[in-house]
Image: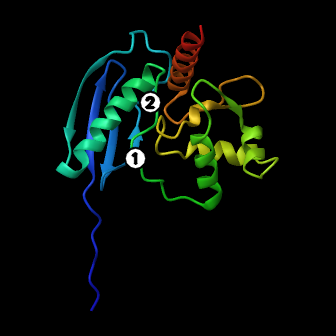
Amino acid sequence: MTRATSRPAVSTLCIRSSWGPIRVAARCGKVVSCDLPELGAEPHKPFRWLGSKSAATPSDRRVLEQAVRFVRRALAGRAGRPPPFEWPKATPFTLRVWRALAGIPRGEVLEYGALAGRIGRPGGSRAVGRACGANPLPIFIPCHRVLPNDGSLGGFSAGLPWKRLLLERERGAVGAARA
């Protein structure tokens, strides 16, 4: 006779904004996903916080509160260390890419090919791009900091307006801190 094991419930947080809802989920005191509303084009209205609503279990409430602060700071270009998060299940290569992404300093960018070289896969820029696109924790694992070598933005799972916003805000905050 086998006994089924159930996974702990997932707690969710919805951060309402003028660009749509940002959803963050946590389980066992760690962030497990982040969904940004897809933006097909630059929004005409400025980004504004409209509040948040949580359906958290008591054990996840603290990490979701940390996630709200982190996301707000990230969208202001000042994100520090992210709250605890669970590394998503992925291939060893994809995990190497995500761990390397986490090491790119705020306000800096790296080309896909350079990141591939850093993880020991020279010539693996397309595979790095696929791993970035599969990132279920955008903002927390900063895949927006990786660009193609042609100077374009490349891609981003929630749309290029988000990538542009994150990069502009980080560069602005870093530039202001250095001035």
Which residue occupies 63% across, 45% down? 100
Disc 2 residue type?
A: Glu
Residue found farthest to the front: 178
In the rendered image, the quadrant that contains the N terminus is: bottom left
- Please state, as top left, top right, bottom left or bottom right, where the C terminus lies in the image: top right
Residue extending farthest to the bottom is 1
| Secondary-structure class at tag 2 | loop
- Which of disc 2 and disc 1 is earlier in sequence? 2
Tag on residue 38? Answer: 2
| Front of the two marks 1 and 2 | 1
The amino acid type of the residue labelled 1 equals: Pro
Question: At which x and y percent is residue 59?
Answer: 22, 52
Q: Residue at the location (32% across, 32% down)? A: 68
* Residue 129 falls in image quadrant: top right
What label sits on residue 84 in the rendered view? 1
Query: For residue 76, what is the image quadrant?
Result: top left
Residue in the image at 50% along x and 25% along y = 162
Residue 86: x %, y % from top left: 43, 53
- Determine the CA span between mark 1 and mark 2: 25 Å
